[in-house]
Image: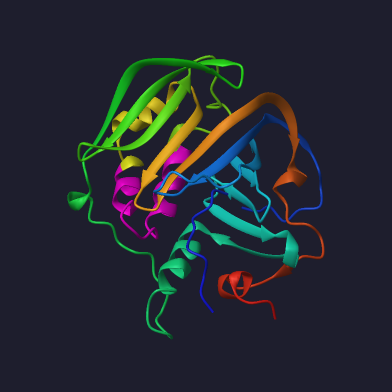
Amino acid sequence: MRVKRTLVAGLVVLGAVSVAQAGWVIEENTVFTKPNGEARPAEPATMRISQGRIRLSQPSAVTVQDCVKGTFAIYVPDRNSYWSGTLDEYTAQIAAAGQDKGAKPSVPKIDVATLPKIEVKKTDDTAKIGGYDSVKYVILSNGTTFQEIWMTKAFNVNDDLKPDNYLECQRKMSVAMQGNAAGAFNALYRSPEYKELVASGFPMKTVVYHSAGSYTREVRSVSRADVPDSDFSIPAGAHKKSLNDLFGPPQ
């Protein structure tokens, strides 16, 4: 059985106590577009942020990432099953899926010297997205457009999700990426320019370009909220699985 290779943001605190903590609730839509311009139907998603934790709820899966503890979990509602562990364990197991059977999982090494050059360019384009005035930035990877990010300076989530912690988590997640965009993602999360952009506000819309088309995430609404600890927990009664079993054929 093969592990699904899509990296998804998201840990899990396996606790029973539900204590509300100040945080954010962000409603968004995601759209995948094929190279021929054909777009799949938009999928709704909800992101909850509190105390360095990110929960992303999508129709097919829920992921929780703790950017302070360096842990990750993914829950598949249709199977009432989940996997959880450290970010290093996750990336090692994802990488091992492409190796010979029986190979010992290990975290892939990144040769920073071979990564593409990342440039962040501010444009004059503006738009109101999710109710907030936003400015378009273009991210170049070796001179080619890799991402478009529409940033608002009206608010940021830095008190609940420190940029350094967030970027460290993304660096750990990206080492297991494969495909043409893998190098660009690994370079992006190590870019001082990108770190400065992340800390300056909040991305209301992000478009990622790659060989398989593009991926667009657009925020519909943002609200301050008391996010309970239970939102970062796996539902009681869920079954823990290996990553292979979690994404493999039903047993």
Q: Quadrant of residue 167?
A: top left
| Image position, residue 2 (x, y; %) | 51, 75
Tell whether position 176 is magenta. Answer: yes
| Image position, residue 202 (x, y; %) | 51, 25
Magenta highlight range: 165-187
Depth check: 69 or 57 in front? 57
| 62 relative to 158, above or below | below
Q: Residue furthest left?
A: 113
Q: Quadrant of the N terminus?
A: bottom right
**Residue 97 visible in this rendered orientation of the protein:** yes
| Image position, residue 247 (x, y; %) | 60, 69
Q: Residue furthest bottom?
A: 102
Measuring 74% from the left and 63% from the top, which residue is drawn there? 78
Q: Main secondary structure of the magenta part?
A: helix
Depth check: 108 or 58 in front? 58
Residue 39 placement, left or right of 138:
right
Measuring 68% from the left and 77% from the top, which residue is drawn there? 250
Depth check: 235 or 47 in front? 47
Q: How is the image coloured?
A: rainbow
**Residue 52 visible in this rendered orientation of the protein:** no
Residue 235 placement, left or right of 126:
right
Q: Quadrant of residue 77?
A: bottom right
Tell whether position 89 is magenta. Answer: no
